[in-house]
Amino acid sequence: MEKQTVLVLDFGGQYNQLIARRVREHNVYCEVKSYKTPIDEIRAIKPKGIIFTGGPKSVYLADSPRMDKEIFSLGVPILGICYGAQFMVYGLGGEIGAASDDAAAEFGRTDCEMKTDSPLFKGLKKKSVVWMSHNDYIKKLPAGFRSVAHSDKCPYGAIENADKKFYGTQFHPEVNHTEQGFDMLGNFLKNVCGCVGDWTMENYAATATRELKEKIGDGKALLALSGGVDSSVACKLLANAIGGQLTCIFVDHGLMRKNEGDEVEAAFADSGVNFVRVNAGKRFLGKLAGVADPERKRKIIGEEFIRVFEEEAKKIGKVDYLVQGTIYPDVIESGLGDAAVIKSHHNVGGLPGYVDFKEIIEPLRLLFKDEVRALGTALGLSDNLVWRQPFPGPGLAIRIIGDITPEKVAILQDADAIFREEIAAAKLDRSINQYFAVLTDMRSVGVMGDERTYDYTLALRGVSTTDFMTADFSRIPYDVLEKISTRIVNEVKHINRIVYDITSKPPATIEWE
Ligand code: XMP
């Protein structure tokens, strides 16, 4: 059966990614495209349904986003959300009012009553809370439409033209505050568009593998493997498609977490790809000797990474394709694909320009992070790799405050390993989004077995976050912290004091450097 696609047309709303995620949570494949996408391109996709997102503008402004009205003649079901609904009304001859004139603006949780004979609300409770966020409002419906939901202030909370399969909501069904929003979207996808919900990562893996095989043919591909989720999943996918034509270069800078280099190697050594592990620990630590400034550390590591990668790539010779682990949020955030090439360089801190490749392949560019994880599982990657928390490119170098020595790296690796072990044992490893130890350069007095000690203070950090742009410190139970603290001071030499970081981001950052 042909792949069923729903198009999310972006009118500049703040929730466009969220809409796409919700659609995919219904196992329906969707893509986010700009409202500027030419009608012929939209027609060629043969979408099962189209969703217009919200947007910040009023439809009457000269520069507000509008698209060709032919969109309404494609015979494709449409759901307009907020601005999207207003654009639909405006485009089909209805009228939009400015709330400032009529005091009809609504923001936040709003009680709403729905008509459950509409396919959009079938099987749902009649009354529930929805999330409103609008200044303008629908004043007069176009011909053929009726109101199917209303709030106190808003007679047209949701509208339908059942014949044409056009729907609009003044509220945002995609946000969690809209109590039945997820089911409303499901109703649109299934009852209105006829989507069957067969988008699964097993299907994706099979299709992507076939497409990659066709594209690459007998060419050669190169991938910079960091051991993070994205590059690991990309590697596995490519390995299945082209096996020995792929070479993965894993630069072990000696600043990985305990045993991590070996774990990455074990996961890929027998995968049928050419796996090159470059043990460059001495080289990196040599360059970093005596350097305490965080920015200098980052710069040195970034540059050295490129040098090592270049040297290895040269040994392999001419490669046709460079594989990058770019994922969908990067694509959406960087302007719906316009900036893809910039991102591909960004991923590995600037890849060498001279590596003679024809094209960049980004096999995950349409997937969200949770889908990448699900794909990894479908491809048989271990939980260890699939659920790996984010790890900064410069590794432990930016978790050792002050200058870096091999001894300090070993101390931090051991302490961090215990922290991670105990967090996993307490079954907190999936609820805390990132957690790690930091070796500070502060020493203090302690007493151990009647002896005076003068040793390092270790800081523990655990945060909960969805986007890593803001974060709250995790409330790890005291008894878990106590166990971690006791184990670390007993098992790791040169640490005699442990503190827990209780700052959020902002004002702190997640990492200490
Ligand atoms: P901060 O410390 O800025 O970190 O709050 C936000 C997230 O980014 C990760 N991070 C990095 N990741 N290269 C990376 O690939 C880096 O140089 C880098 N610095 C920070 C950090 O671990 C957190 O998840």
Image (cartoon, rainbow, N blue to C red):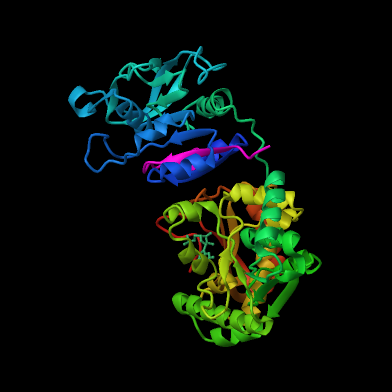
Q: How many marks?
A: 0
Asked if the stretch drawn in magenta spans residue 320, the answer is: no
Residue 481 falls in which quadrant of the image?
A: bottom right
Q: Which residue occupies the extreme right position in the image?
A: 270
Q: Nearer the viewer, residue 73 or 297?
A: 73
Residue at image point 58% right, 50% down: 367
Q: Is residue 151 left or right of residue 20?
A: left
Residue at image point 66% right, 66% down: 415
Residue at image point 64% right, 30% down: 196
x then y, percent, for residue 431:
61, 46
Q: Quadrant of the N terminus?
A: top right
Q: Is residue 88 left or right of residue 284?
A: left
x then y, percent, for residue 348:
55, 70
Give, as a single range, the part of the protein colored magenta.
Answer: 1-19
Residue 164 at least partly seen: yes
Residue at image point 38% right, 23% down: 110
Q: Is residue 498 left or right of residue 69?
A: right
Give above or below for 146 relative to 47: above
Q: Nearer the viewer, residue 371 or 468?
A: 371
Q: Nearer the viewer, residue 215 or 449?
A: 215
x then y, percent, for residue 168:
41, 26
Q: Nearer the viewer, residue 82 or 415?
A: 82
Asked if the stretch drawn in magenta spans residue 11, the answer is: yes
Residue 419 at least partly seen: no
x then y, percent, for residue 44:
51, 42
Give above or below for 267 relative to 168: below
